[in-house]
Amino acid sequence: MANIFWVTAKTHTDSSIFQEPEKFNPARFENPGSLPPYNFVPFGGGARICPGYELAKIETLVTIHYLVTHFTWKLCCTDDFFSRDPMPAPTQGPSRSNNSQETSLIQQILILHASPRGSRVL
């Protein structure tokens, strides 16, 4: 008997499936039929897909809508970013050791300041 473990994160960053996989590009999902099956599986797939899939999509859309309509956003710390590999850490701050044996994708995190719009009570 063999155990097979599928690391979906590697599938999601495969350049033979997604052009420039490290780049944030939501347009690549505008036409879901253009992707071969099971190449983007954040919630699993098939008969055992996560039952919270639709709820997660709705929650995400409602949250983004609320944040965009209730706040104005300004970029802070334009000379510094945070890198995430796998935990956030300032790129220009104190150094930290990374004992991970696996090469992971470095992601940059923008630091934003949110100001409430108008006189809305939160």
Image (cartoon, rainbow, N blue to C red):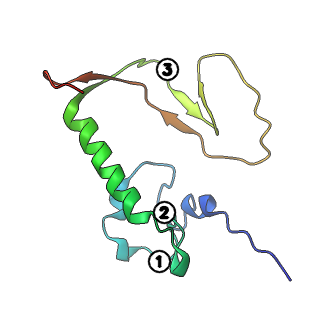
User: Is disc 3 in contact with disc 2, using a CB cutoff of under 8 Å?
Assistant: no
**Residue type, label 2:** Phe
The N terminus sits in image quarter: bottom right
Which numbered disc covers residue 80? Answer: 3
At mark 3, the secondary structure is loop
**Residue type, label 3:** Asp
**Residue type, label 1:** Pro
Q: CA distance from mark 1 to mark 2?
A: 11 Å
Residue 24, image x, y percentages? 42, 48
The vertical placement of 98 against 44, above or below, is: above
Q: CA distance from mark 3 to mark 1?
A: 38 Å
Q: Which residue is mark 2?
A: 18
User: Badge 3: few (under 14), some or many (20 or more) residues near its Cα, within 10 Å?
Assistant: some
Q: Earlier in the sequence, mark 3 or mark 1?
A: 1
Q: Earlier in the sequence, mark 3 or mark 2?
A: 2
At mark 1, the secondary structure is loop
Residue at the image point whose x is 67% and y is 63% from the top = 7
